Image: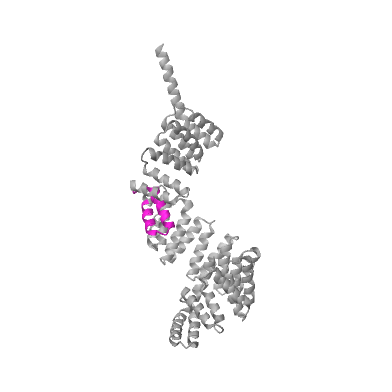
Amino acid sequence: MVCAVTFVIFWLVCLHSLQAASAPDLLDGYLASGDLRAAGELLDRLAADPKVPLEVARAIGAACVRRGQPGLAARYLERATARNPQPLLLADLASAQFLAGEFAGSAATLDAMARNGRLAPALVSLRGLAALQLGRRAEAVRHFRNALAADPEEGTANFHLGTLAADAGELRDAIRHFEVAARTYRDRYAARYNLALALYRAGRWQDGVNVLEKISPDPAAAGEVENLLAQGYDKLDRVREAVEAYQKAIRLDPKNPAYVFDLAVMALRRRTYDLAEVVLESGVLSFPQDRNLALALGGTHQLRGQMEKAQQLFQRLASAHAKDPLICVYLGNSYFEAGRFEDAVAAFTRGIDLDPENSVLYYQAAVSLVKLGRETDPRVRRFLGKALELDPKLAQACYQLAKIDCESNPARARELLARALRLDPELSEAHFLLSRLCRQAGDARCAQAALRRYEALRARERDRLERDRVKGILFTL
């Protein structure tokens, strides 16, 4: 009789163990089929069972996380750890809470664990991540550094310290941390990509290219790697490889207009306007709603001297986007270069109505009025003053005001020229006007020095003017 009772008890225990052991698979099936109600009911039964083994409880939480339900995992593990506060279960709980976006809960769990014993470096890093998500940057940095004190190779801490250093412009530290993260962080691709970005920002283009050439990203990320690689090749004057990398990026991710735009920008900077035009025409056909590609194409027509073609494109854009002030900038500039100053004034003032905080529009409207011979128009001084108010570093506006004042108030004009030349020492026309004012004031030394500087700058003026035309298109976009 005693043997029979013992056998029954043994059988019941074994049956319970078998049922508990199969619970993660059963739960996984519910989650895979999307039956969250059944999954929740099963989790409630398991949470109420004090005999669920530790490894099974952890497997249950892992199944929830694997199926994209970290909130369910956190709910189950909170109840499981209340009954069985094992460090491994608590670590799983903190991770699930973090993945579920419950950052305060994750931080509280980890704080409680830290009070009861020393945390593993990975969990110290998790404390840092939780603090970072809660906006406590200094605390996050402290946790990450503590993690590295325990394990200098800890990947998460190195990656996020690298990110924080890069954001702060501390590129040497960023590179040092990313180099470690590239070996040890769970997402090696992210670590290497960010390492390449930091190297680029530090001007170490070849080192950045070396990192990118060794990356083997997922197919979904291959386009962005090729695009970044192309930027490095461009900086290294490996133009053919840059073009090939941009083209490869476009083939790998044909739905991303940014890669088309970047290739066109490189061509414009290098003044290969024919290549830029081909690239942008194809891009506009592929992405007819992309305003920036269309503006860049119009700007390229303009750089090639095709003013009418550029203006027609800008006019179509202005009709399609009637409230876009940037289109007014491009249309006005095109009219200005073509000598249609009245139309330029109309375009720029229309832009001012749409964007009264745009310094470029005020400046260009004022200069267009000057070109029409209307220096005494009260709008000229008002527009230039507003341009400087919005952009105190706009050297050209200071120069234009100096031109207006040079006859009536030469002292004021010299002050404005001094300000303009502090902002842009290579503004040749300002040196010429300064030479004239100095000569009128009887200051021969000043006049000669300003004239020599003007002549030196004029020797390379054509190249500068063309560079400024290109820069104007790229900057506004």
Specify whether residue 393 is painted magenta: no
Residue at image coords 57%, 74%: 384
> In the rendered view, does 386 fall on the left or right side of 425?
right
Residue stretch rendered in magenta on the structure: 152-180
Q: What kind of secondary structure does the magenta stretch mostly adopt?
A: helix
- Count of labels in the image: 0
Q: Residue 229 sits in which quadrant?
A: bottom left
Specify whether residue 156 is painted magenta: yes
Q: Nearer the viewer, residue 75 or 315?
A: 75
Q: Position of residue 209 (x, y in %)?
A: 40, 60
Q: Position of residue 257 (x, y in %)?
A: 54, 59
Residue 207 to residue 104: above or below: below
Residue at image coords 37%, 53%: 177
Q: Residue 212 sits in which quadrant?
A: bottom left
Residue 389 to residue 413: above or below: above
Residue 35 seen from this side: no
Q: Position of residue 387 (x, y in %)?
A: 56, 71
